């Protein structure tokens, strides 16, 4: 498709919702107030005494210096970019670069993640049960994105081919991310940011567990409110 036909939109969300696995701890390098220009040197020093440090930090070379963010909570923004991998592609990336995805509501974030968790559980043939723990991150977005809402091909529920190509072209053309319709939650909206500095550092909110019935994610449990919800 011709990306020149894609217009932009200024997205202003005071609350952007992102659901992530609870197993990922904060990365000290990002959380401290160290100058991002010193990250490579600090990472090199630390990895000499603890080789696992380099693995937890990820690939700093994937994020240009000018686009890095640091300080309390920065791990949650930096992580999807420094840990991008072809083993973990998405709608708007083949995995060779990172994308920070967020929804305009709690429901959007849950349904989007539940779908992908279902695919993972099927692929690994997991037995039924309460398997997955997640935490909700809530931040703000105030930025201009490429608006993809009017392009059905880029919202194909089963194929990412066209959307990955369009996203790569938009990123190479200088766009900072995309704004699109949620494919898993009717009337929901999402953003996919191509760089960390596009996103306000989020705060941690509720914790959730997902129940796998052997075929799909059928229930969600909010640990703070002690409420359980069924998924159709």
Image (spheres, grey):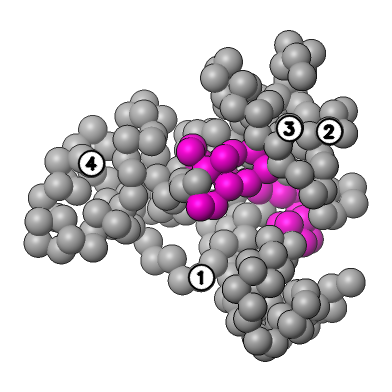
In terms of secondary structure, where does tag 3 sit? helix
Residue 53 horizontal side relative to residue 44, left or right: right
| Residue 192 in view (yes/no) | yes
Magenta stretch holds residue 167: no
Q: CA distance from mark 3 to mark 2?
A: 7 Å
Looking at the picture, how far across and down is residue 141, in whole percent? 63, 38
Question: Do the residues bearing badges 1 and 2 touch, measured as CB atoms within 8 Å?
Answer: no
The residue that mark 3 highlights is 162
Q: Which mark is residue 153?
A: 2
The residue that mark 1 highlights is 22
Q: Residue at x 84, y 54 (%)?
A: 185
Pointer 4 local density, CA inside 10 Å: few below 14, some 14–19, many at least 20: some
The residue that mark 4 highlights is 39
Residue at the top extreme, as displayed: 4
Q: Quadrant of the N terminus?
A: top right
Q: Is residue 76 above or below residue 189?
A: below
Nearer to us in this view, 208 or 174? 174
Which is nearer the N-term, disc 3 or disc 1? 1
Looking at the picture, how far across and down is residue 105, in whole percent? 76, 54
């Amino acid at each position: 498709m011709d990306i020149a036909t894609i217009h932009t939109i200024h997205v202003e969300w005071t609350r952007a919702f992102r659901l992530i696995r609870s197993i990922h701890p904060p990365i000290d390098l990002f959380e401290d107030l160290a100058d991002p220009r010193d990250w490579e040197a600090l990472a090199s020093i630390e990895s000499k005494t603890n080789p696992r440090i380099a693995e937890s930090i990820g690939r700093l070379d994937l994020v240009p210096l000018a686009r890095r963010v640091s300080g309390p909570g920065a791990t949650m923004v930096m992580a999807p970019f420094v840990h991008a991998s072809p083993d973990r592609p998405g709608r708007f990336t083949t995995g060779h670069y990172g994308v920070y995805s967020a929804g305009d509501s709690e429901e959007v974030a849950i349904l989007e993640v539940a779908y992908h968790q279902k695919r993972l559980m099927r692929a690994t043939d997991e037995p039924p049960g309460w398997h997955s723990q997640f935490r909700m991150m809530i931040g703000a977005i105030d930025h201009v994105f490429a608006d993809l809402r009017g392009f059905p091909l880029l919202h194909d529920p089963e194929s990412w081919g066209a959307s990955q190509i369009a996203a790569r072209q938009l990123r190479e053309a200088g766009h900072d991310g995309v704004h699109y319709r949620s494919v898993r939650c009717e009337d929901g909206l999402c953003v996919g940011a191509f760089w960390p500095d596009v996103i306000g550092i989020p705060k941690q909110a509720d914790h959730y567990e997902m129940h796998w019935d052997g075929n799909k994610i059928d229930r969600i449990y909010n640990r703070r409110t002690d409420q359980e919800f069924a998924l159709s």
